[in-house]
Each structure stands twice: as C-alpha cells, then as structure tokens.
Image: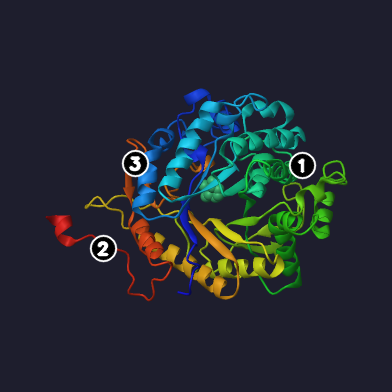
C-alpha cells in the first residue's frame, strides 16, 4: 500500500441517536426520530433507540475500546434535542456538560474528536414549522450550532454541520421512510436547500467561537450507466446531478447545477425561486474548510420515463452478473471509491477530503471461541484502504478515515438487524466484543496504513486459547 500522511486521522464513527439510548436523561427533549419510531411498522423488527448501545452511560467503555485499538480520531454526533430540548431558545447545559466530558477525555487520550451537529435527530418541537421544509429551520440550526460552538469550540478542531443532506431530503421528506416520515417532493427540495443554507449560515456564526475546520458530510454515489446507450449515459449524468452535484456544486463551487435545477423544476411543476432565494447560493458557497465523504457503493442507472412514482427520468437497476455484495446486498466497489476521490480532487481542487463514513453490513456473531471472525469485513476494509492509498498516490488530499461504524447500532428504519460495527454489541446485555476486523484495522493503523501483501491475514485465535 502507498503512503498515508503521518498525521492521517485513522478512526471510527458513530452517531448519537444510533448508540446513546437514555432518551430521557439530563433534560433531553424529544427528537423527530422518537416520534417516527413510535409509528407502527416504521422500524423493522419494531425496535427503537431507547437503549441502543447504551453509550450515553457506557461512553468511557467505548473510549477504552478506541484507545485499545490505537484510533487517532473518533467521529460522533451531538444530540441536537439534548442541547436544544425545545428546538429554540433554552440551551440545556447538562447535555453540553456531558459532551464536554467526552471531548476532554478523547483529548486526554490523544484521540481527535470529529463532531457532527446534525446526524438526523432534529428536535421534534421544530416540526411545528415543518422541520427542514420550513425556512425557520435555518435559524434554529444556527442557534444550536452557536450554543455548541460557544461551549465546545475551543476543543474541537473538526466540525461537520450536516450528515448526508441528500438522505434526509430523500428518505425523510420525499419517501417518508425516515423521520419525520413526510412524502412531499417539493418539500423535499426545500428541506435539502435549507440543510445547505443552514450549513453556510452556521459556519459563519461559529467562526467567532471556534478555530476548528467546518464541513459537511455528503454520501456520494458514483453513477454509472447500465449499458453503452446514450440514453443510459444521460440517465447516469442526471442521477449524478440529483445525488452528488446538487450538493457538491453549491458547497464547493457556486450555485446549483443548471441541468439538475431544470430537472427539479420540471418534477415539481414550477420554479424553485421561492425556495432558493436571492443571496442563498452566496451564503452556501465558500463556507467549507473540508469535505466529509461517506462512501458505500455506486448506482447503476438506466433511462426510464418520469411518471407518478418516478419524478426524474432514470432508475437504479444495479449490476448484472457476479458482483461482490455485503449481507444487505450492497455492491462492493472499491475501484469506484478510488475514482470518486480522484474525481473530487480533479473537479473540486484544493478542498481537503475526510472519509467520514465507509463500511459494510456483515452479520457475523460470536463463534465457539467467543470471538467474531468477520473475515469479509477485514477484506472490505483492506480493499477500501487500498483504494484510498491509490487516490493519495494520484494526488487526492485525504486527511482522515473514520470507519462506519465503531459499534453495531440502531440502523434507523432497518432496526438492529444490519451490523456495521467493528465491535459487536449484544443488544440484550450491552456487552461489546471486539471483532477480528477491528484488530486487523488496529494493525493497519499502527503500521500507518502499510500492511502489504496477501500474507497480512486477520489475526487468528490461538488454538490453545480456543480449546484449552
Ligand atoms: O448508519 C448510517 C449512518 O447513520 C449514515 N450513513 C449511512 C450509515 C449506514 O447506513
């Protein structure tokens, strides 16, 4: 493998709602996910996040695991509804006390905190103004960001304002599959825009209380045509506009891409001017010190007529033939990861890139020896780290990698079935078991990303240990 910079931020990631539990602790307010998870059928298996990984109480144990693995960074999120229980106005200092303790302890252990502000758990109180559909959401988010930054800004060097605005817009406001469960195409366009505007405004407002770098984490999906046809090529480009460029261009260039704006206006049957007002694009551009890249897979696209259930003239068809897949059937495409990083370097030059999420679902559980031999996750990790090494060799300015996820956790509407963790969590007892993939990752981190050759196998359990 090629060289990673010596100060590369090797780490792992989580988010508050997915791991914390303790939904009533220390004056927390309700979040949109509390309400959504109560709707029958909203979460597979009927689970909710009342306990999750119990990390609000077991956070020191989680930090011990990070230390034992030699991690240099921990990406986690602040629970918005803990800090702003009523959505606006009152700041709950007890919640900030908690996060201050976590951050100070990370710093003492020389683990860099990478702090996300909005990982989907908007205070439920903000739904009286439509959640992200309402323009007031921008001011509400700025208030929260400033409260967090005034208290924690002197000890956080990496801030992520928004996690995956496209997913919030799509699943939360267009398809209704995530909180707040709204199905409104025009509303989803407004939600996506307000998320970006809130980033720009919050970044400006935070600068006086933090010297930390401020960015957004986008889930980027390379879009490839299913066939050689011109129609599929156009579909892939359209999909790229919808998923990727609609967020990259306003953040890292200036303004929304015209081709996608035309698609949106056709789909909602009118201009976007009431949503994207004069001056908004100026307020979004140039407000990012780095880009967070969440990478899982690609989208294989074909042309398809737009209609009642399909707002845009394309569809995801997936690959044909033999393709390596995770246990959730997600296609594993490390070459597309490398190419994406190189594309970002080429098309949005000068912006540091942090891979803020990358990971896979594998359902391995403890075997006869109590260990978890998740060899497929190890292979996944190695192939994606190799892809990053190739991207770095090609000039991509990569500064860090936080694997998704440190822990098996509450995977939103899919409940507890998909296990993304480097660490297994027994959800009945809260017990954590470090998986083989985590031990292998720790070796890679210790070696600065340089474990060469096929002989670098995941650590095997000593046979006497297993049977003795
Ligand atoms: O678990 C999620 C995370 O919250 C956001 N990005 C994708 C992950 C896996 O689906």
Label 1 Cα neighbours within 10 Å, binned few <14 / some 14-19 / many ≥20: many
Where does residue 320 sit, x and y in percent of width and height? Answer: 56, 68
Mark 1 near ligand 1 (CB under 8 Å)? no
Label 3 Cα neighbours within 10 Å, binned few <14 / some 14-19 / many ≥20: some
Label 3 to label 2: alpha-carbon separation: 22 Å
Above or below residue 437? Residue 342 is below
| Residue 60 is at least partly visible in this image | yes
Above or below residue 405? Residue 442 is below
Residue found 73% across the figure and 64% down from its top: 237
Residue found 37% across the figure and 63% down from its top: 446
Where does residue 244 sit, x and y in percent of width and height? Answer: 69, 58
Looking at marks 3 and 2 on the same chain, the residue that comes earlier in the sequence is marked by: 3
Looking at marks 1 and 2 on the same chain, the residue that comes earlier in the sequence is marked by: 1
Residue 266 left/right relative to 381: right
> Which quarter of the rendered picture does the C terminus lie within?
bottom left
Label 1 to label 2: alpha-carbon separation: 51 Å
> Which quarter of the rendered picture does the N terminus lie within?
bottom left
Label 2 Cα neighbours within 10 Å, binned few <14 / some 14-19 / many ≥20: few
Above or below residue 466? Residue 429 is above
**Residue pointed to by mark 3:** 426
Residue 150 left/right relative to 236: left
**Residue pointed to by mark 1:** 190
Looking at marks 3 and 1 on the same chain, the residue that comes earlier in the sequence is marked by: 1
Where does residue 230 sit, x and y in percent of width and height? Answer: 76, 72
The label shown at residue 460 is 2
- Of helix, strand and loop, which one carries label 2? loop
Q: Quadrant of residue 38?
A: top right
Asked if disc 3 and disc 2 are in contact, CB closer than 8 Å, the reply is no
Q: Nearer the viewer, residue 324 or 425?
A: 425
């Amino acid at each position: 493998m090629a060289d990673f910079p010596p100060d590369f931020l090797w780490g792992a990631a989580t988010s508050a709602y997915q791991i914390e539990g303790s939904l009533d602790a220390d004056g927390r307010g309700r979040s949109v996910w509390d309400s959504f998870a109560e709707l029958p059928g909203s979460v597979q298996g009927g689970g909710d996040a009342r306990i999750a990984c119990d990390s609000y109480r077991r956070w020191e144990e989680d930090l011990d695991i990070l230390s034992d693995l030699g991690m240099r960074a921990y990406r986690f999120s602040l629970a918005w509804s803990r800090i702003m229980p009523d959505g606006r106005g009152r700041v709950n200092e007890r919640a900030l006390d908690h996060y201050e303790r976590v951050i100070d302890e990370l710093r003492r252990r020389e683990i860099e905190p990478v702090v996300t502000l909005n990982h989907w758990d908007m205070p439920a109180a903000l739904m009286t103004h439509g959640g992200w559909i309402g323009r007031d959401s921008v001011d509400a988010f700025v208030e929260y960001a400033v409260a967090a930054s005034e208290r924690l800004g002197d000890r956080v060097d990496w801030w992520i304002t928004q996690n995956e605005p496209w997913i919030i817009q799509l699943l939360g406001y267009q398809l209704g599959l995530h909180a707040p469960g709204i199905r409104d195409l025009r509303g989803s366009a407004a939600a996506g825009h307000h998320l970006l505007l809130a980033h720009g405004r919050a970044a400006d407002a935070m600068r006086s209380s933090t010297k930390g770098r401020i960015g957004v984490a986008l889930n980027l999906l390379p879009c490839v045509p299913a066939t050689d046809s011109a129609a599929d090529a156009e579909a892939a480009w359209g999909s790229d506009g919808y998923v990727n460029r609609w967020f990259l261009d306003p953040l890292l260039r200036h303004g929304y891409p015209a081709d996608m704006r035309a698609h949106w206006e056709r789909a909602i049957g009118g201009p976007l001017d009431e949503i994207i007002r004069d001056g908004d694009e100026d307020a979004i551009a140039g407000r990012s010190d780095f880009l967070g890249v969440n990478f899982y897979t690609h989208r294989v696209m074909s042309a398809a007529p737009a209609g009642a259930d399909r707002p845009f003239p394309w569809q995801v068809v997936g690959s044909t033939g033999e393709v390596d897949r995770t246990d959730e059937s997600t296609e594993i495409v490390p070459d597309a990861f490398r190419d994406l990083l190189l594309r970002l370097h080429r098309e949005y030059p000068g912006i540091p890139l942090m891979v803020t999420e990358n990971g896979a679902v594998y359902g391995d559980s403890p075997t006869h020896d109590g260990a978890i031999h998740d060899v497929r996750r190890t292979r996944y990790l190695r192939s994606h780290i190799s892809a990053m090494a190739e991207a770095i060799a090609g000039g991509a300015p990569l500064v860090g990698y936080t694997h998704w996820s440190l822990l098996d956790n509450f995977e939103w509407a899919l409940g507890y079935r998909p296990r993304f963790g480097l660490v297994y969590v027994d959800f009945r007892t809260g017990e954590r078991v470090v998986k083989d993939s985590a031990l292998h990752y720790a070796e890679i981190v210790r070696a600065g990303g340089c474990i060469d050759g096929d002989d670098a196998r995941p650590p095997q359990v000593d046979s006497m240990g297993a049977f003795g």
